[in-house]
């Protein structure tokens, strides 16, 4: 049997590869010689394609070709050496390529049978039909009967290679996206200018808000301020719901007045300053232990009864789908939220941070913050002024399961706390937990000026525009400003401190 000539192999592989294909061929020792032969190839060789017959030599070539081809896979660790990578688009070219060759040789099949020995005719009868795809041709199981000689490798290696190629061929139809390149979205990159300050260096925008105090400050006692925030309507709401809950639990004769309810709250506040292990110890008969301020205001049994039935909402009004974990105290929180806003207008300089309400009891909403003086309790997001007055607050309910926004859950909380200060040129100060570039740009559109510490990994590429740590002495700083007036400052103390603002 004659060997297959090099120029015939070149003609056999002479097919057009798409420009966007990722096909690559294995390196071999004959690459240089093939390149020289291609330059001197005669145009008359194209006419020989019509006379090309699928002789057993070509069958052996197809069988060996199976061992040198694989489809692109996401697991490069299993990738054998010396394989050709073919993407999805080339598979269709292979189909037409093989089908054309098989169709061209059908007309000369009778002539081939006369010249080919009987042993070769039997091998030719096992050829695939023109309707078969290239996946069937390239399948190592389907082409096993076509090959007379296989590469001799250990049995374990041959099984693993066959299993790998078979799984890759099966995945090509179901996971087409694995072979296609991923196109990245074109996002506008921020331009930074090192050494430039923002445009509001010497002209800070003027505050346009009002400075109003809507509560009576002539009487400066703590009770006078407290009673203007905890309004009569709030106490009436609590009294009504407490009586309703007591009746629902069989205490039909239970009664409660607003005055008595105020005493109950006053006792709870006093107990936070002087703590006893047991509530009944405040009414002890022993001198030095009894606290007359509490014992004379309300009996121990009455205090325990009110504490048992204290309620803020009707339990029968519980929503079917609970999305608010604080729904049992939500009416009280809403009244307090409105009272805090209406009492004093928001000052020019404000800050947003987290605060803790100490609590060590049982609750799924209890948080632990090691950096706080009171590490266990309920976490509250707070917007406060320079005098410490809380203008707005939001209770933390745990990780949000809502659809993620551009600003993240913490950024959304900041926007909620700033709902009443739009367009008044407030100056907002935050730490690096809150500061992100998308959030600052959103607050910029609301005319809220922000200054806060920064985590440097939240600003892409800014490190290239700031002076390196080793070149800065203690007390010196480096500055860079973006094309949309965002300014990042690096200041060196014992450690590097980064701040970000927009002017």
Image: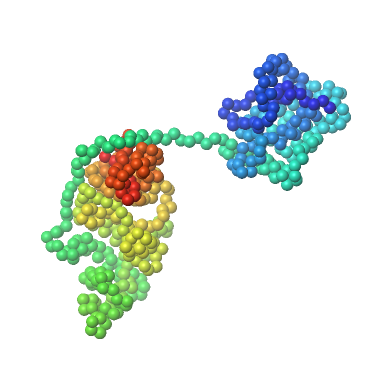
The quarter of the displayed image where residue 154 is located: top right
Q: Position of residue 266 (x, y in %)?
A: 23, 70
In the displayed structure, 292 sits above or below 422; it is: below
Q: Residue at x 59, y 30 (%)?
A: 21
Quarter in which the N terminus is drawn: top right
In the displayed structure, 346 sits above or below 359; it is: above
The quarter of the displayed image where residue 398 is located: bottom left
Q: Looking at the image, which is closer to me, 194 or 49?
A: 194
Instruction: Describe residue 448's horizontal placement relative to residue 63 as left or right.
Output: left
Q: Residue at x 29, y 79 (%)?
A: 280
How many marks the image carries: the answer is 0
Q: Position of residue 29 (x, y in %)?
A: 69, 29
In the displayed structure, 398 sits above or below 261; it is: above
The quarter of the displayed image where residue 301 is located: bottom left
Residue 419 appears in view: no
Q: Position of residue 431 (x, y in %)?
A: 32, 50
Quarter in which the C terminus is drawn: top left
């Amino acid at each position: 049997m004659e060997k297959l000539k090099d120029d015939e192999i070149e003609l056999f592989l002479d097919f057009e590869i798409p420009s966007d294909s990722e096909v690559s061929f294995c390196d071999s020792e004959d690459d240089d010689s093939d390149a020289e032969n291609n330059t001197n190839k005669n145009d008359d060789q194209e006419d020989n394609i019509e006379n090309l017959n699928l002789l057993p030599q070509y069958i052996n070539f197809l069988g060996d070709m199976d061992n040198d081809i694989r489809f692109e896979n996401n697991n490069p660790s299993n990738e054998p050496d010396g394989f050709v990578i073919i993407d999805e688009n080339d598979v269709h070219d292979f189909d037409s390529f093989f089908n054309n060759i098989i169709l061209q040789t059908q007309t000369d099949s009778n002539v081939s049978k006369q010249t080919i020995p009987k042993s070769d005719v039997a091998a030719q009868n096992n050829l695939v039909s023109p309707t078969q795809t290239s996946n069937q041709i390239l399948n190592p199981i389907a082409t096993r009967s076509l090959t007379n000689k296989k590469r001799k490798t250990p049995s374990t290696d041959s099984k693993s290679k066959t299993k790998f190629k078979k799984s890759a061929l099966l995945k090509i139809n179901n996971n087409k996206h694995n072979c296609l390149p991923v196109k990245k979205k074109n996002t506008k990159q921020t331009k930074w200018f090192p050494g430039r300050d923002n445009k509001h260096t010497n002209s800070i925008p003027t505050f346009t808000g009002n400075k109003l105090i809507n509560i009576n400050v002539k009487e400066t006692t703590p009770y006078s301020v407290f009673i203007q925030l905890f309004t009569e309507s709030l106490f009436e709401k609590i009294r009504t719901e407490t009586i309703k809950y007591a009746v629902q639990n069989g205490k039909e004769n239970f009664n409660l007045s607003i005055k008595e309810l105020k005493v109950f709250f006053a006792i709870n506040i006093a107990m936070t300053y002087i703590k006893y292990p047991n509530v009944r110890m405040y009414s002890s008969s022993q001198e030095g232990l009894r606290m007359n301020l509490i014992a004379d205001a309300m009996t121990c049994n009455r205090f325990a009864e009110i504490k048992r039935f204290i309620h803020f909402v009707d339990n029968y009004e519980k929503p079917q789908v609970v999305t608010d974990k604080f729904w049992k105290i939500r009416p009280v929180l809403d009244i307090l939220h409105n009272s805090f806003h209406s009492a004093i207008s928001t000052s020019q300089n404000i800050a947003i941070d987290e605060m803790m309400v100490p609590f060590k009891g049982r609750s799924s909403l209890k948080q632990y913050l090691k950096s706080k003086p009171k590490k266990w309790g309920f976490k509250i997001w707070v917007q406060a002024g320079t005098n410490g007055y809380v203008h707005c607050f939001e209770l933390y309910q745990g990780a949000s399961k809502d659809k993620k926004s551009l600003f993240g859950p913490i950024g959304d909380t900041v926007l909620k706390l700033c709902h009443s200060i739009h367009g008044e040129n407030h100056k907002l100060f935050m730490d690096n937990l809150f500061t992100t570039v998308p959030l600052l740009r959103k607050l910029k559109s609301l005319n809220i000026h922000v200054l806060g510490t920064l985590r440097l990994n939240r600003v892409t590429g800014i490190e290239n525009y700031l002076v390196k740590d080793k070149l800065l002495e203690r007390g010196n700083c480096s500055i860079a400003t973006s094309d949309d007036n965002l300014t990042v400052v690096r200041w060196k103390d014992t450690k590097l401190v980064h701040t970000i603002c927009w002017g």
